[in-house]
Amino acid sequence: MAKTHQTVSRRAFMAGTAAAIGMPALAQSQNSAGTIEFERDVTESVRRNISSFRSLDWRPYFSNLNNGAVLVDISSRALHFWSEDGSTYKLYPSSVPLTEDLTRRGRTQVVRKVVGPDWRPTPAMLKRNPEWPSYVPPGPDNPLGTHALYLSWTYYRIHGTHDTRKIGRRSSNGCIGLYNEHIAELFSMTKVGTQVLLI
């Protein structure tokens, strides 16, 4: 009898633990009223990797919101977007450059938008990784995912990724990566001329 009770208790414990582990982690942001809003489920890999995911006020970083504004916080691995009229604020987990020497900070802007981008590694990437192909067409093997925002800095982009394990990590060669569904949403809200700041 005691053994059966112990088995049931263990089974209940294991089921409860599995359920708790399997529960989705939620990205959250704080709205203007100070309450927390849950925006989307994030994958288990992101739950382990995002270090500091918090909303920001745009005013310390931009003098205005002309054409909208994107801020990428490298240390918290998050991308923030504000619409031109200030009515829309979005917060997305992102991948950031692997190392400090690959990281560029400062002000730039969106200069081109591409759905289904192709990809060519930079000369420096090919030197570090000679086994890489020199060209990858659009599709599931493309490291730029489904959409790309090209910045005024040569070779730098904000883009999607098919490898969701990269989000929330230092995993890129310089670009900022988002989930494909997030880059599609950001793509629809930005335009050529949208301000971008990497800090």
Image: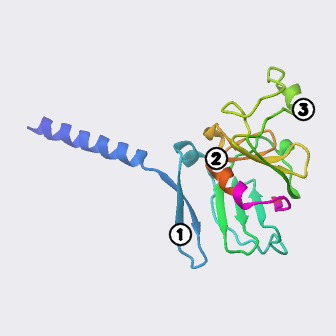
What residue sits right under mark 1 in the picture? 36
Quadrant the N terminus occupies: top left
Looking at the picture, tell me which residue is in the foreground, 166 or 194: 194
Position of residue 196 measured from the top left corner of the image (x, y, whole percent)? 82, 60
Disc 3 on helix, strand or loop?
helix
- How many angstroms separate mark 3 from mark 2 (CA)? 25 Å
> Which residue does the image show at 74% across and 39% down from the upper left?
144
- The disc labelled 1 sits on which kind of residue? Ile
Look at the picture and state if 111 lies above or below 121.
Answer: below
Total labels: the figure holds: 3
In the displayed structure, 72 sits above or below 14; it is below
Residue on which the image places disc 3? 124
User: Going 65% across and 63% down the picture, which residue do you hit?
Assistant: 90
Alpha carbons under labels 1 and 2: distance apart = 22 Å
Disc with the residue nearer the chain's start (1 vs 3): 1
Image quarter of residue 87: bottom right
Q: What residue sits 87% from the left and 42% below the top? A: 155
What residue sits right under mark 2 in the picture? Answer: 179
Q: Bounds of the magenta span?
A: 187-196
The amino acid type found where label 3 is placed reads Ala
